[in-house]
Image: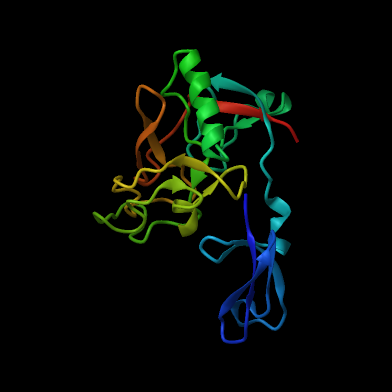
Amino acid sequence: MGFEILKRDTNGNKGLLNKAEFGYDDYPDGGDEGRVYIGDGVKNRALAYLDELSNIKMPGEILEFKLIKNGSSLRYVTDEIDPSLTEDGYELFCPHSKEEYEKARKYLLGIGEPSSMGPLGIYYSEDGPGGAYSWCSECWHSRIPLSSNGLGSKGWKVKDGSLTWWASDRTNVTEPNGDYKANAYLGIWYDDEGYVRWWNDANDAYSYTTYLCVKRKR
């Protein structure tokens, strides 16, 4: 994961300093004190300020997968998997990269369950622009890849707090189009090879009892 140090002057202009992982913002949001942040050198934006990182987990190596069927219902990011799974070190699978997604896809193909990856932990923390039951075609965050560089740049996140995540590079999906209820998981559909073929934000309509869990090295 590559980052660059950026510095913002009093006029709000950002300049590249050198290759690094952290940047320093002199006057964030018009404040009086500077703050260190992790910046995305590709789009020159702050992904997170250092003083906000206490709840963010960095990617950990995948140790093993476990497919859950008839599990605890997951509709919102606040819903939890069965406590016995948590006690055994499992968590809902959130793909931190395309490589991780491929590992999960191949695991599910191997057990004959390519469409069972589940919600991938993807959510947004506010209602859509028209409220939970109002939508508009070709608007809000539609036609944007399902990844941290795509929908993540609009504020979509994954449950485990990873700054990087990936599920699809597709740009022909006319969702999410705004009829969304805060903190609900996206509805995600998969093809027979385990790739994401469509997603939808339709209020809080999607509840998962089949999903992939993962055990990570911490």
Q: Position of residue 117 (x, y in %)?
A: 48, 28
Residues 101 and 91: in front is 101
Outermost residue on the right side: it is 218
- Horizontally, is 143 left or right of 109 in the view? left
Q: Position of residue 133 (x, y in %)?
A: 31, 52
* Residue at x 28%, y 48% (from the top left corner): 174
Outermost residue on the top side: it is 111
Outermost residue on the left side: it is 137
Outermost residue on the front side: it is 18
Q: Position of residue 185 (x, y in %)?
A: 46, 42
Q: Is residue 64 above or below residue 217?
A: above
Q: Is residue 108 above or below residue 150?
A: above
Residues 162 and 81: in front is 162
**Colour scheme used in the picture?**
rainbow
Q: Is residue 19 above or below residue 217?
A: below
| Quadrant in the picture for residue 189 | top left
The quadrant of the rendering that contains the C terminus is top right
* Residue at x 55%, y 34% (from the top left corner): 99
| Quadrant in the picture for residue 3 | bottom right
Confirm whether residue 175 shows in the render: yes
Residues 146 and 9: in front is 9
| Quadrant in the picture for residue 195 | top left
Q: How many discs mark residues in the rendered view?
A: 0
* Residue at x 49%, y 13% (from the top left corner): 111
Q: Is residue 16 above or below residue 139?
A: below
Confirm whether residue 69 shows in the render: no
Q: Position of residue 217 (x, y in %)?
A: 73, 32
Residues 134 and 26: in front is 26
